[in-house]
Each structure stands twice: as C-alpha cells, then as structure tokens.
C-alpha cells in the first residue's frame, strides 16, 4: 500500500507541475500578444512613411520645376514690358525667347 501512495503522490506532483507549466505558457502567450500587435502597427506605419516619402520627393521635384517655369515666365514678361515701353530692347526679348525655348526643350 505504501508504494501505491508514493506512486499516486508522484503522479499528483507531475499533474501539478504540468498544470503550472500550461498556465505559465498561457501567461507568456498573453504577455506576448501586445508585442505582436505593436510590431504589426510599426510595420504598417513604416510602409506608410515610405510611401509618403516617395510622394514628397516627387512633389519636391514638381515644385522645383514650377519655380523654374515661373522665373522664366517672369523674365519673359519683363522683357515684353520693356520692349513695349521703349521699343528697342530687342536683345532682352531675344534672350528671354531663347531661355524659354531651352526650358521647354530640356523640360523633364
């Protein structure tokens, strides 16, 4: 009879240890859940930032192109107004025409 009691106590110990291990594994899984959500959110935000950076770069190039076109248009308008005022500023008008042509030819 004492050996049966010893065997039963060992089986009880194993059951208790197995239950504790299962509880600890479950607890660790629950503790890792926020980390997984956080990693998913970080990945999503990283992808969104990369897209926005690409768009920002393209927008910057477009804005620089618009600025160059605006400067050329302003110079051409100035040359036209000088020519209209005194009638002999043909060189400035020809330079403005050449600059506009070069810009339109070399435009991206």
Image (cartoon, rainbow, N blue to C red):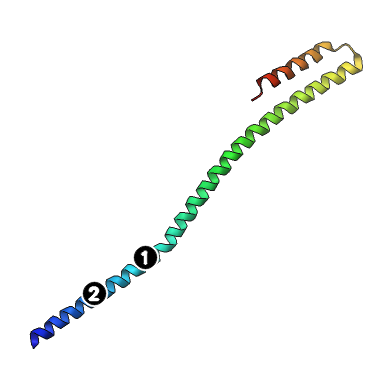
Q: Residue at x 12, y 83 (%)?
A: 6
Label 2, secondary structure: give it: helix
Q: Which residue in the rendered view is the most extreme toward the bottom?
A: 1
Q: Residues within 10 Å of mark 1 (few under 14, many from 20)?
A: few
Q: Position of residue 10 (x, y in %)?
A: 16, 79
Q: Which residue is mark 2?
A: 17
Question: What is the spatial separation of the Cα atoms under label 2 and label 1, in whole angstroms?
Answer: 18 Å
Between residue 97 and residue 75, name the one nearer to us.
Answer: 97
Q: Quadrant of residue 27?
A: bottom left
Which label belongs to residue 2?
A: none
Query: Where is the C terminus found, in terms of image quarters?
Result: top right
Q: Are marks 2 and 1 in contact (CB under 8 Å)?
A: no
Q: Residue at x 76, y 14 (%)?
A: 95
Q: Position of residue 87 (x, y in %)?
A: 90, 13
Left or right of residue 47, residue 3 in this image: left
Q: Residue at x 44, y 62 (%)?
A: 34
Q: Residue at x 53, y 43 (%)?
A: 50
Q: Is residue 42 above or below residue 53?
A: below
Label 1, secondary structure: give it: helix
Query: Where is the N terminus found, in terms of image quarters?
Result: bottom left
Q: Position of residue 42 (x, y in %)?
A: 48, 52
Q: Which residue is mark 1?
A: 29
Q: Position of residue 3 (x, y in %)?
A: 8, 84
Q: Quadrant of residue 23?
A: bottom left
Q: Is residue 83 above or below residue 24?
A: above
Q: Quadrant of residue 39?
A: bottom left
Left or right of residue 7, residue 107 in this image: right
Lower position in the chain sequence, tag 2 or tag 1: 2
Q: Residues within 10 Å of mark 2 (few under 14, many from 20)?
A: few
């Amino acid at each position: 009879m004492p050996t049966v009691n010893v065997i039963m106590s060992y089986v009880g110990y194993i059951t208790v240890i197995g239950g504790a291990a299962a509880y600890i594994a479950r607890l660790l899984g629950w503790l890792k859940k926020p980390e997984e959500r956080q990693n998913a959110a970080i990945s999503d935000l990283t992808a969104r930032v990369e897209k926005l950076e690409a768009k920002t770069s393209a927008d910057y190039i477009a804005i620089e192109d618009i600025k160059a076109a605006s400067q050329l248009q302003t110079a051409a308008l100035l040359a036209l107004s000088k020519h209209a005022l005194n009638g002999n500023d043909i060189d400035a008008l020809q330079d403005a025409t050449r600059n506009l042509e070069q810009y339109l030819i070399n435009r991206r």
